[in-house]
Image (cartoon, coloured by chain):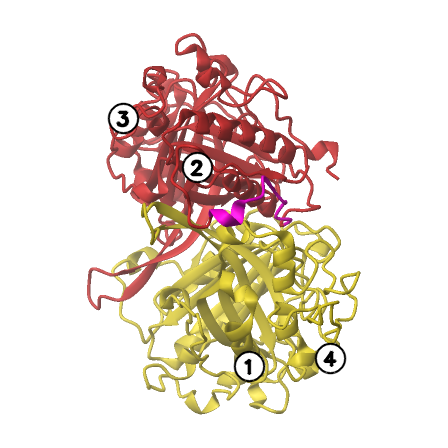
Chain colours: A red, B yellow
Amino acid sequence: MAAASDIEPFWGAHQSGIVTATQRHAVLAAFDLYTDDRADIVEVLKRWTTLAAALTAGESAQVPVYQGKGVPTDAFAGATHQPTASDSLDAWQLGAQRLTVTVGFGPGLFTKNGKDRYGLAARRPAQLVDLPQFPGDQIDESASHGDLFVQVCADDPQVAFHAVRSLARIAPEVTTLRWTQIGFSPSDTGGTPRNLMGFKDGTVNSNGHPPADLDASVWAGDEGPQWMRGGSYLVFRRIRISLERWDRLDTAVQSRMVGRDKVSGAPLGGHHEFDAKNFDAKDAQGNPVIPMDSHVRLSAPENNGGAMMLRRAFSYNNGTTPFTERWPPWRQTLAYDAGLLFLAYQKDPRAAFVPVNQRLATSDAMSQFTTHTASGIYAVAPGARGPGDWIGSTLFA
Amino acid sequence: MAAASDIEPFWGAHQSGIVTATQRHAVLAAFDLYTDDRADIVEVLKRWTTLAAALTAGESAQVPVYQGKGVPTDAFAGATHQPTASDSLDAWQLGAQRLTVTVGFGPGLFTKNGKDRYGLAARRPAQLVDLPQFPGDQIDESASHGDLFVQVCADDPQVAFHAVRSLARIAPEVTTLRWTQIGFSPSDTGGTPRNLMGFKDGTVNSNGHPPADLDASVWAGDEGPQWMRGGSYLVFRRIRISLERWDRLDTAVQSRMVGRDKVSGAPLGGHHEFDAKNFDAKDAQGNPVIPMDSHVRLSAPENNGGAMMLRRAFSYNNGTTPFTERWPPWRQTLAYDAGLLFLAYQKDPRAAFVPVNQRLATSDAMSQFTTHTASGIYAVAPGARGPGDWIGSTLFA
């Protein structure tokens, strides 16, 4: 049913969905674990792997339902008596659509509320830090974190959601959905896509233009636990953009905040998107051409000890949030709840996302228009090598 | 920039976005009016028309900002000093993407809180009824209604949202966003698309398979006010589907609730999607082959005095809503906030949506799995005939 060009490879040393060219749609989902039995997690990860391999190949989802051993009985359990449930058919005949399923492990898999539920506490990588509270953070805990995480991407929104639903159906008593979030990217026009701020997003450090040495910046190596070799660490942030205010600024003002020309994407002082950034250049008045508080200056690898990440950018649009103005006549008004799903894969968040975001949250002029409202960090295990292997086998072995 | 095949015509006797083949993405947006000056509404509608004509032709949005006369001054008004603001560029070079902008008038435009703000109360069509409370409704008022409404559809999600943002920017002090809601439809596979329940959606009464006589069922005629001739009435319902429960049912059980075979889409007892429905057929036990409480039986035009509507179906996925189970061990769990954006255009909701939905809400077996959580009804004026004309000209003339 699926054309070969629509199929992204599933098996391999690394999970797919990281260096994979960005698809048009994403559904992110996090799960909490209610079982006390380590064997339940192993069973679910094996079944998730089998299902993900089938779905990404464009096959239908015959969902092998699993009740779990270490969980209380659900009042609706009678409805799940079938060992294998039928495909829900909402993505039937739509093909593979470049579907990828990328599985991550949250800190809660290793310890939760101080408890080592599955005997994994000693295997938690030092790289999997608890993220600090950054200046300006307004994190909604109910849309953050999660013991397990999946990033599902596809060129069709229904195919992506179908995969999440199918994964969630396998063992709802073991892995209970904590939150989901959908995102989109614009149609491919050949160049770097634009985000909702209207700027090109992904000129550097993205899977469109990745760092030259992935082993140095993205893939986990010998510096951490062996079970993570070939994996990566994912930092997720849902970043709300005050579009209703941003849209009122002059393009020139926006460009100075970003440090790039809005139309061409060139660093200020340059002419083309990929021109070198000249952070020393001064204008006639002696002011830096690329402002001191611009996003580009503060985030550039050369100004952050070489810190690199591989970002996959999706926009999101969760509608609008009402609030009442704080000045007369106290009118009811609305803010967009829309912006960027920031997904950054990295070798060590302690050397990449954490220090870079600390600078941005403190000093970036653009941060006046952005608010981080959800957050997560996950250890993305290496890939499953082939049929019979499963994602997480190196951790639970 | 835009290929001709990507452009849907804007000018005409009817607004586009009604019989137009369904696009891949929708952004719905409703606005409340804070002005006391009728001239402000006229000015906004003229500017919306000009902007919508440009955007649907694939041109960029030079937004003619309007402060309004009958509204209080905004503390941020200084930022809108430019008579024309630049395009926000987030959809630049993406092309027209079959963009359509369809404008509707809510009951609040005619009277609000008992007040005839704009001298339009006497022109309110009888067809623009206040919808009753149906059994099972759980309507979120903050995601419902609105004095003005736009249905924006396009084959690219960023192009659709860009149009809403651009319209909202013209006069934020006059037309303040009340809510927005995004939706999607799956890739075109040639057949009737499937909804999130996994069933073909749109076999009858949809813009994929429209009623034969649009003048009899969709377009307003001489039975109502002259200013609405060539317009239509839109009923919007956001219908949440309990996917987490639906996905646990046998396919056969689902098919009996719908009254159609899930795989083929054929009415039960038939073999092909478009086979005639035999409501009199009985099985060997004497039971109706198409159950009495099935969706197809209760909604069929032939069982509703011929009531027809033109539906445009989009799915939505707003993530998940946490709740605590009502039985031991009172586990925290999640429900999908996902389902269907029901958009039905009709000549007279009093003879179509209202009585049909009353039956469905009362008797449809499928209603156990659906909840209407947002609602709106809008008078969708006739189209603007050409440059110089504007949507709403017949009402305000």
Nearer the observer, disc 4 or disc 2?
Answer: 2
Name the side, left or right, on which B321 lies relative to A210.
left
Q: Which residue is mark 4?
A: B213
In the picture provided, is A95 more to the left or to the right than B117? Answer: right
Q: Residues within 10 Å of mark 3 (few under 14, many from 20)?
A: few
Judging from the image, what secondary structure is the residue with disc 2 in? Answer: strand
Residue segment shown in magenta: A77-89
Comparing labels 1 and 4, the label whose residue is closer to the camera: 1
Q: Same chain for labels 2 and 1? Say yes or no.
A: no
- Labelled disc at residue A115: 3
* Residue B289 vertical placement versus A363 (above, below): below
Both on one chain, marks 3 and 4?
Answer: no
Along the horizontal axis of the image, is B109 left or right of B76? right
Whole-percent x, y for residue A386 in the image: 62, 19
Q: Which residue is mark 2?
A: A175
Q: Residue A87 in magenta?
A: yes
> Which comes sooner in the sequence, label 1 or label 4?
4
Per the model, the C-alpha gap separating discs 2 and 3 is 18 Å
Assess whether residue B150 is covered by the magenta stretch. no
Marks 2/1: CA–CA distance: 42 Å
Q: Nearer the viewer, residue A228 or A8?
A: A228
Q: Disc 4 marks which amino acid?
A: Asp
* Circle 4 crowding by C-alpha within 10 Å: few under 14, some 14–19, many from 20: few
Q: Subunit of mark 1?
A: B
Q: Tag 1's secondary structure?
A: helix
Amino acid type, label 1: Pro
Label 3 – label 4 distance at C-alpha: 67 Å
